[in-house]
Structure formats: C-alpha cells, structure tokens
Image: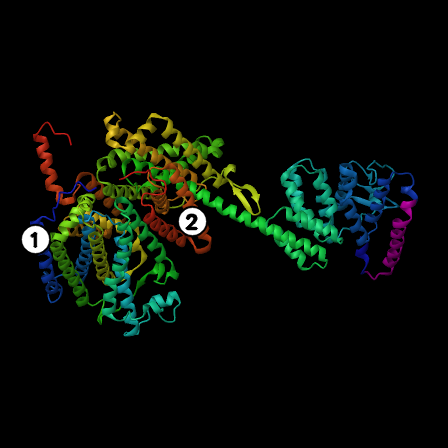
Amino acid sequence: MQPAYAGCTFPALHLDLIMLFFRRTLARFFIPLLLIVASMPAHAQDRAAILTEICSGDFAAQQSALGQLASAGVEQGETGASWARTIVDAFEGRNLRCGDGMAVIDGDAGAVMAGTLEPVTNVDSASLDAPSVNLRLRAVAASANAVLRLFTEMEAAERLNAANYIDQRREAATGTNIGAALERETDPDVRAVLITLRASLLMSDDDPTNRIVAIEAIAEDATLRNRTMIAEAIKTETDAAVIASGEAALADIDQTLAIGQVLATLYAGASYASVLFLAALGLAIIFGLMGVINLAQGELIMVGAYAAWFTQEAIRVTVPGLLDYYLIIAIPISFLVAALVGLIMEVLVIRRLYDRPLMTLLATWAISILLINTVRVTIGSQNLEFHQPGYVAGGFPIVGDFIMTSNRLFAIAIAVLAFVAVVVVLRKSLFGMNVRAVTQNRSMAGAVGIDTRRTDMMAFALGSGLAGLAGLALSPLYNVNPGMGTGFIVDSFMVVVLGGVGSLIGAIVAAFGIGQINVIIEPIYGAVAAKVFVLLMVIVFIQWRPEGLFAPKGRR
Amino acid sequence: MAHDQTAARVDRPLLFRIVAGTLFVLLVSLPVLGGPLSGSSAGVSPYVANIIGQIATFALLALALDLIWGFGGILSLGHGLFFAMGGYLIAMHMLKSGYVYGGVTPDIMTFMGWSELPSYWALFESFPYVMLLILVVPGILAFVYGYVSFRSRVSGVYFAIITQALTYVAMLLMFRNDTGFGGNNGMTGFTTLVGIDIGAPSMVVGLATTSVLVLLVAFLACGALMRSPFGRLLIAIRDDEARLRFLGYDTLWPKLAVWCLSGVLAAIAGALYVPQVGIINPRLLSPEVSIEIAVWVALGGRGALSGAVIGAAIISALKFWLTGFVPELWPFILAGVILLVVTLLPNGLLDLKLTFLRRASTRKASARPAE
C-alpha cells in the first residue's frame, strides 16, 4: 500500500507518508527488539527478524526475508520449512498483516501470531496492513514457496513439480537450500532435477571453490546440456583454477559423451539387427532346408505387424483394461497368423516347385504383391496407429546422452527370445532333428523314414512365423503400412547371403554387422549410401566366401 | 538345377517361323498402314503404332532375358537396370541435342538448378557417340558384374537376388536428386530425335517400325546363335555345368559372353522404349519391373525365343488394355498369372498342349509310374 502513495501530491497524504516512514523505521529497528526478542530461543529470534524485514515494506529487505524463508529448511528441517511456507503462503495471499510491532496471519479460523502460529484474540487483524507484494516480490515468493515445498510435500510428484518450477524460476533458490533439499530427497527423479539445479546455482556463486565444486557436480552427469552449461560458464569465468577445472570437466564429459554416442549407435544398430535377424532367420531356415528364397518374407513381416494391430483393436473393443499388454498378447498371435499364411503358401504353391528354385522366386514374389495389394484394398495404405504402452515408451539413461529406449529394447528382447526358442526347437525337438537331417541330406533323411514333405511344411511355417515376430517387434519402431516389407527384403537377403545358408550363428553375426553398418553410415552419408555400401560389401564378400561366413564345410 | 527343361531344345521350329513371319509382316505393313493409310479404316493410328512399338521393345527385353535365363540357366532379376541404362542414355541425348541445336532448355536444368549441363553430358548431342555408349556402358557393367560373379561361381538364387539388390540400389541412387540424373522427376520434355519432331506421326510410326526391325533382327540372330555350337555349349552349361568343367570346358567365358550380350540387348530395348513413351524416371528400376520381365519369359516359355516374344506381347498387351479401366486390378491379375504359370505350366504357354496331352494319358493309364 505504501508505494502506491508515492506519486500523490495531496497535502493530507504527505502527512500520512511521513507517519508511515516513522512507523516503518520503528517497526524495523526498535519494536521487535523490545517486544518480541527478549525471551525466545535462537531460531525464534531469526523468525522475528525475518518477520520484521518482511513487514518493513522495503523491497530489498523483503527480498532478503524471502530468501531466508526459502532457506528455513536448511538448519531447521521440516518444521522450519513448514513454518516458512505458512509465512510465504500468507505473504503471497496478502494474509500476513503487520503493525504495532507484530505480525499476524489472518486465517479463516481467526488470526494467529506469525512467529509462533499461536492464535491471538486481542488483535484486530483488519486494522493492520498487509505488506505490499509487487510483481518481482511475487516471483520471489513463488520461487521460495516451491523451494519450501521440496521440504514439506509428502508426494514425490509434488516435489518433482516444485523442482521443475524452481528450474524455471530460480529467484529464491540457492546452492545451500537446494543442497539441503537434495540431502533429504529420496526420489530419483526429483534428485536428478535437483542435482543439476544445485550445480548450476553454485556456478554463479561468488566463492571460486564453490564454483569448482559446482563444475565437478555438473560434470558427474555427462549430458550435452551440462556440457553446454559448463562451456558457457567458463567463457565468462575469470578465476584460473575454475577455468582449469572447467576444461578438465569438459574433457571428461566429451569422453563420456563419445562413449555414449558409440553405445547409442551400437544400440540402434542392435535393434535394427534384431528385426533383420528375425526376418533373416526364417529365410535362412527355409533356404537351407529347401533351397527356396521366399521373396514374400517382407510381406510376412507386414502380416505379423497387422496381426499385432488387429490384436490391439480386438483388445480395445473387448477388454480395454488389458490394452497395455497387447504387445505381449500379440506375440503368439503374430507368430501364428504369419505361420498360417506361410503354411498356406507352402501347401498351395511352394511344394509344387521344389525342383525349380528359380520359379519359386517368381511365385513368392507373386504372393508378395498379392498380399500387399490385398491389404491395400481391404485395410487401406495409410500408416497404422499403434497404442504405445508404458513399457515401450521412454527408456533408461545409461551413459552421456545415450538412453536405452524401451521400444528398441522390446525388439531386441523378442529377437533374443525367438533365437532361444529356435535353438531349443532345432536342437532338442524331434521336429528340429528332422529339419537338420533333411537340410543335410534330403534323400537319406527320406530313406530313414522322415516325412520330408511334412518337415518342409512345418519349417516353412516356422520361418514365416519368425517373420511375423519381426513384424511385431518393429511395430513400435517403424511405420506399419502395406508396403513396409519391401524395405527389409534386400537387407534380410544380404544377411542370409553373408551369414551362410542354414547357419544360426552366421545369421546373428551377419544381421548384427549389416544392422551396424546401416546405422553407422546412415547419419553420415544417408540411407541410400548405407544400402549401396552393404550391397557392395556383400558382392565383394561373396568373391571371397561364396557360401557365406559360417557355411557348413563340404562340397556342393 | 533346371532339370525341367527339355534337353537341348532351342525352339519349336514352327513357332519360331510363325513369330519371325509375323514380325516381318508387321515390319512391312506398319510403315504403309501407319503412313499413307493412317486415316483410312484399314490403317493404323499413331496411338496403336506407338503401342505396337512399345510392345516390340518389351519383347526385345524379354528376348534378352531369355538368352541368359532360358539358355544359360541364370536368372537375372535386374534386367530393368540395363533397360533403364539405355533409356537414360537416349534421354540424355535427346535433351542435350534439343538444348544445343533446338535451343530448348531442358526442365531438368530448371529443377536441378543448373546454369549449364554438367561435364558428364559432354558430347551427348552426338548421335553416334550415344549409340556407342548404349552398347558400351551396359556392356562394361555386365562384364564387370558378370566376371566377379561367375568367376566365384555365384549362381542360382544367389545370383538372382544380388541382381535384384543391385537394381534396387540403383533405383535408390537415381531417386536422389544429387545423383545428377533428374532424381525423382527423371527426364522428360524431349523435342527431337535425329532432327525429327518426336511427336510427329511419321516419327511415331518410324520408331515403332525401327523397334520391330530391331526385334526381328535380334530374334533371328539369337536364334542362329543358339543353334550354333556356342548355343549348344551354353545349353550344356545350363544343364550340367559341373560335368562340362570336368570335360575341360572353361564355362566362365560362354556365360559371360551371353550375359553381356543380354545386357546390351536390354539396353537397346530401353533406348528404343524411352523416345516412344517420352519419359524416363527411376521407377523403371524398381524390382517389380525387373520381375515382370522374368514373368513374360516364364509365361512364354523359357528356353524358347519365340516364347519370350509371345509372353512379352501377351502380358504387356493385356496390361495396356486392363490398366486403361481397372488399374487397381492389374497386380492381382499379374500375381494370378504368375501363380498359374509356375504351378500348372512349368514351361509356360508353350507347355499348354503338352500338359493337356499328359493329363489325357494320365487319365487313360490308371497306374502312373512314380516320378
């Protein structure tokens, strides 16, 4: 209220202003000493001093008071913080009233003493003035309030909100009070925000040692953002020790960032490789067994992805509560649907063409355009929309800026599971033994009583089902539309050619290698260059080992 | 590998003569019917002449593939690459000569932001130079790729898949604008070829007639080549390459020779095709186009030159007719034709009669010997 009078020229108000000046000065220096301080514990004296300042109406004093309030939790813990928060709340809400050497808080249940929060009865709070709150003070108060919430809120989510707010509005935050809050904090998310916050606050500290501590603290979390923060800070820095420490920290961060970058690239490559591996594993089994290259393998990937989408839609309609688990539920469904399509292909077309491998290329290609166009006509050629459950959104930060994203992890997990399952099936089951026998010597296997046609049929279904799993694994990662399979087909074949026919290890190594080459070259020279490079590499490689990396020894 | 073919059969002499005769009749009648008689009821409109010309280039392309697949037993799923190569070279010639002699600024310079054509367009206004390139560039590519593949004995599905990948990568490259061949837009806006307006009816009929002539010459020449000792050797390699090696033949060079011949023929077909459609873009390099070529040959019957020509003519005529009113149905029809051919007619339409005969005899004989 006081500053509002400042520009007035009426004589009566001049008198009022003079009165006000006296009252303010008195309230600030003398009355508290006389009335409040006398018989109180130390922190109560502090409280009184703070209240005096906040009541003073002087901007600098009020600001300092809010600063002290914000730091109330540092030494006095939660009780202090909760008291300070009450004061700040009251101050913000204009419920803090000052006058006659005391401060009271006006509440619904009557006034309480600001210092002790005990009810007062003999004061008419309405006759007391509320200290003015201008825009800048309001910002400081809001910031102080957020700091205090860090000490007083029970819910981690509320504290996280407060921490994020402070990150934006740092008026009342200091290295000390955020540091104290950090020591009390148990929630990892809130801690993460507070650690950076405290560090960046300490960076602007007057004491060079504190700035060095801050730089070291920031450097502990090596992200690109923190690197920029330190680089910016040492640009304007004058203290040599701080600059040296900053540069050392930058070097450290750069190293970690580089490691993170490499890991992120490897990770992206591994996830692409998982999809390739799933598609190529099916191809390799079929090719090794029957000498048939299935050009529709890409479309079986598409079928798997569409099966996952239909699973999602069916769950959405019938049991919406399980929607988040559709990716898990779709694992057997994608596999079985693609396997069924493969089985039908085998029975109707492929089995008639065993002695004409080149014709199977044409036949499987015809099936692939049939599948693409059928889907295009019945469902449409737009990208399908997939629900993203919590477990495939987000990720885990590992090193530097490298975040292990869950959707890629999902693809890798599916590939690992499928690999284990295929190894178990091929090594331990009767069917697997038959597949291995027929792959090695078809006529001998037939002679000892293995039903080779049935083995072919089942193996074709298995290979197709693996492609379906690939479709499921890539649905959280890539666009799903009728033409999605064509992009994978060249790479999957390169995996088979590179890895060698019918070799599981070969497929893994080749898929990983081609996946890595793709993600390494892509950001530098583009996707086309990556494909060109992979192709040239495979052509050159075939000169050296025509039967692939891990071909079974022997003559053909 | 390819055991399903009748050993050492070059063609059916009767069918070969019928196809050659038809082509000859077309060659003689087309300039007359499309020229002076064009307006009359018996005449051929430039539109029909253009379609006949296009089909002739497709037949030439099929012939090229049949040489290597039908007689060499090596399937290429990348003949679209050679076809497009010929097409791009002739397109560059037409744009450059239009620019140099006709003063027409090609669209490609506008959207590529070129103030003048880059250095690799040098001399492209010269027709003999481009003709030479159409023979040499695809020939060199075919030689290099064929040499490294055949030398390391890459064959069968491996070879087919890698040719497909090669074409696919070429498509990706050509789709990029900075590769320098018009990118996604390709090349179009041709004005003249050998000094004649490209849209003139005489030019349309002339191009169609030339295509038929080239097809006829290639057909007769390839027929003679396949009946020659070289052709016999090639068929022998197809049927049992290992045995020939043991007999002391070096199988690399015959295969390589026919592979290069096939690539060059495909490029010539492309060079005849592009002036007739007036545009070339990277879609010609898509795997679908290359596989479609294999479908023509498979439908007509591999290992029979007349079959390749008939298959290409039937399927592309069907495609011209159907895509006119039901374009979305075409993929289904194509897929259906392929599945029908590969499952029921292993040697294509030429097998039709044979298949019926076999069926009839099967019905007569109650006990069929095990195969």
Is B305 displayed left or right of A475 in the figure? left
Q: Looking at the figure, which quarter contains the C terminus of chain A?
A: top left
Percent x, y of residue A473: 43, 39
Q: CA distance from mark 2 to mark 1?
A: 53 Å
Q: Residue at x 69, y 56 (%)?
A: A243
Q: Which mark is residue A518?
A: 2
Q: Chain under label 2?
A: A
Note whether B272 is above or below A88 in the view shown.
below
Quarter occupied by residue B239? top left
Percent x, y of residue B270: 24, 59
Q: Amino acid at mark 2?
A: Asn
As rendered, which of A320 and A312 lies closer to the eye? A312
The magenta segment is A8-33
As rendered, which of B299 and B160 lies closer to the eye? B160
Q: Which mark is residue B17?
A: 1
As rendered, which of A462 and A290 lies closer to the eye? A290
Q: Residue at x 32, y 38 (%)?
A: A553
Note whether A147 is above or below A7 in the view shown.
above
Q: Magenta span has A10?
A: yes
Check disc 2: other Cα within 10 Å, few if <14, some if 14-19, many if 20+. many
Check disc 1: other Cα within 10 Å, few if <14, some if 14-19, many if 20+. few
As rendered, which of A277 and B237 lies closer to the eye? B237
* Display coloring: rainbow
**Is disc 2 placed on a helix, strand or loop?**
helix
